[in-house]
Amino acid sequence: MSLSEDTITAPPPEQRRALVVMKDVSKVFSSGTVALTGMSLTVNGGEFVSLLGPSGCGKSTALRIIAGLGDTTTGTIDWPSSRINAKGLPEGDISFVFQEPTLMPWATVFGNVYLPLKLRGVSKHAAYDDIMAALTRVGLKDFVDAYPRELSGGMKMRVSIARALVTKPKLLLMDEPFAALDEITRQKLNDDVLRLWKETGITVIFVTHSVFESAYLSNRIVVMKARPGRVHADFPLITSLERDAFYRTSEEYRQACETVSKTLLEALGGEEH
Ligand SMILES: Nc1ncnc2c1ncn2[C@@H]1O[C@H](COP(=O)(O)OP(=O)(O)OP(=O)(O)O)[C@@H](O)[C@H]1O
């Protein structure tokens, strides 16, 4: 790995504004579980951040708080680049992709991608171009009239990504989106997400259990520790190679995986598995 060269598109300065600022956040559920403690994280425009850590270390809880879907118990969360609504939450520039594609089985691909715009009161006619653009980005423009039951697992996930992109968010939150897919499909979708990230300049926070996936995708890795959930390490991952099939077999990728893996093992230190 080189710290000087970076062929992964470095975000231009105007994009590097803070999108999310978590300060000393803790989250204690009513059950008494301390899901997060003292978590501080600033994510800047254009970053691709992976949140990596053992089961139960609070990755999903952190992502929900970042999305404005969950309260903090103490500490603060702020979205300095967003328009904030009366509830104190960012208005419309954050999208979420979950592990399950959660498509409406009775609606076509078009209808599923239309949903977020429909909920905002946009007519089908006015939404048409944006829906087709989102479907084109994920390679599904020829499947607009298909129903979810006619699609493979990878295609369903692409629809879910198109649905997240159709509102043109600044920040895309992905919670283990490809964990249920086979390895080849997962690699293809990893490449799709990287391409999207490069083409659109969108900022991504990606939750994963996989060292290999995080080392392939991210330009910054946040490793979390469990019981209670907190940040163990936060470091840039800069490579001199384009992240593609060649990178997957390169010495540089092997080194990146080793670095991430070592850090994860440290985070697991003392835990029984
Ligand atoms: N709604 C809830 N009520 C009570 N406890 C919860 C709730 N949601 C999560 N927890 C607990 O908080 C801790 C952190 O959970 P979280 O799902 O954020 O971890 P995670 O790192 O995303 O786990 P995984 O990798 O298994 O998805 C866990 O102990 C979990 O059981």
Image (cartoon, rainbow, N blue to C red):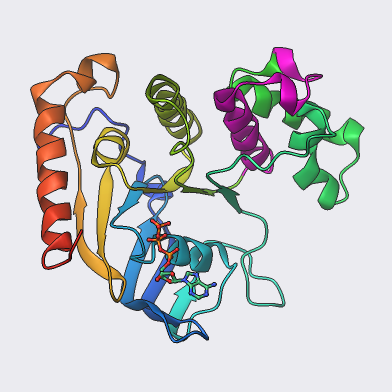
On screen, 211 above or below 72?
above
* Number of numbered markers: 0
Bounds of the magenta segment: 142-168
Front residue of 10/106: it is: 106
Residue at screen point 54% across, 48% down: 170
Q: Is residue 151 left or right of residue 45?
A: right
Q: In the shown orientation, is residue 31 left or right of residue 3?
A: right
In the figure, residue 70 lies in which quadrant?
bottom right
In the displayed structure image, the side of residue 199 where residue 116 appears, left or right: right
Q: Position of residue 102 (x, y in %)?
A: 67, 43
Ligand 1 - quadrant of the structure image: bottom left
Looking at the picture, tell me which residue is in the foreground, 71 or 225. Answer: 225
Q: Position of residue 229 (x, y in %)?
A: 31, 71
53 w.r.t. 30: above or below:
above
Q: Position of residue 262 (x, y in %)?
A: 9, 49
The kind of secondary structure the magenta stretch mainly shows is helix
Point out the image quarter for the N terminus: top left
Q: Position of residue 36 (x, y in %)?
A: 37, 75
- Left or right: residue 26 versus residue 224 is right
Residue drawn at x 20%, y 48% as measured from the top left = 236
Quarter occupied by residue 86 = bottom right
> Measuring 79% from the left and 35% from the top, which residue is drawn there?
105
Whether residue 172 is in magenta: the answer is: no
Membership of 143 in magenta stretch: yes
